[in-house]
Each structure stands twice: as structure tokens, then as C-alpha cells.
Image (tube, helix red, strand yellow):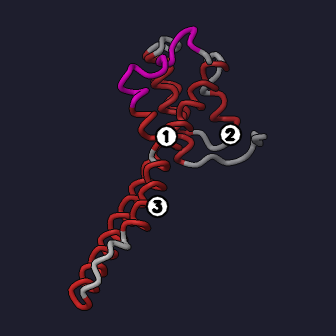
Amino acid sequence: MTKPHERVSNAERESAAKMLADATGAGYLTTEEFDGRVAHAYAAVTRADLDRVAAEIPTEWVRAWEKSRRRGERLVAQQSSARKHLAAYVAGSSLMIFLWLAVGVATGAWYPWFLWPVLGWGFGVYHQTKPLRQARQLRDSGGPRPLGRGSAF
């Protein structure tokens, strides 16, 4: 539950401005209304001030916009995590292959032991990136309907 007298951050003001821009694009605000509301959004000090800029925009649309924004933030976080995991996988696999080569050259033991951890770890990387691949397929196939009039989920 939000408190109306709680102070808002610059990130929340920016988010409100983006929401107003999308609402204007969807036809809920005129350009003049948008200009005035954005000015009020950037001047907002409390949550009550910020809530006033979204007045008269359908609540269902604002909720759908927030849901879409949060989904986008989660996707960015998942992509960052997957990149880090993939980089660690490549570095770790390279180290194991180097060790295997060094031991093979030094002792003549050429059993490819590195395949087991590389395959197991690769399985984890593959499954971590599965939601990202599904999101890409959804985006490439047209994805969900854009926000607009009558498109509240």
C-alpha cells in the first residue's frame, strides 16, 4: 500500500512521464494535456502529486502498463544474468579444456574428463536461457497486443 505523503524518486517521475507518453500514443491524452501533465510529473514531490497526473486515464490501462513495464524489467534482469552465466561457463569450460590438454601432454592420459562437467553445466545454461528464447519467439511472432484503447488484460 502506498502512502500519499511519501516522497517520490526521480526514477518514479521518469516512469510516470513514460506512462503519460504511452497514454498519449494510445489516445487517452491530447498533446496539450500531455505537456501539462509531464510538467506536473517532473515537479511532483509526493505520491499524491504523482497520482494526480494519471487522473482520468483508465485504471485498467495504467495497471496493464505497469505490468508490461515490470515484465520488461524482469526480462532485462534475466538477460543480464544469462550473459554472466554464459561468460562464466565459457571461461570455466576453457579452463577445464586447458587443464585437460596440460595433463594430457605432461602424462599422456587423454581421457576427456572435462566433457562431464562441461555438458552438465551447459545443460544448466541452456535451461536458464529457455525463457529468454521463448520471449524472443513471442516477440518475433508479433507478441502480445500493444496497449491501447480496450486492450486492458
Callout 3 amino acid: Gly
Pick whichever of labels 1 and 2 is earlier in the sequence: 2
**Kind of residue at disc 2:** Arg
- Residue 77: tell me if it is visible: no
Residue on which the image places disc 3: 120
- Compare marks 1 and 3 and give the one earlier in the sequence: 3
Q: Is residue 62 left or right of residue 22?
A: right
Q: Secondary structure at mark 2?
A: helix
The residue that mark 1 highlights is 131
The residue identified by callout 2 is: 47
Residue 31 place in picture, x, y as percent? 43, 16
The percent position of residue 123, horizontal first and vertical second, equals 45, 54
Q: Is residue 150 left or right of residue 139?
A: right
* Circle 2 residues within 10 Å: few <14, some 14–19, many ≥20: some
Decide which of 77, 31 is in the foreground and name it. Answer: 77
Region of the chain picked out in magenta, as a range: 137-151
Q: Pick whichever, 69 or 144, lies toward us.
A: 144
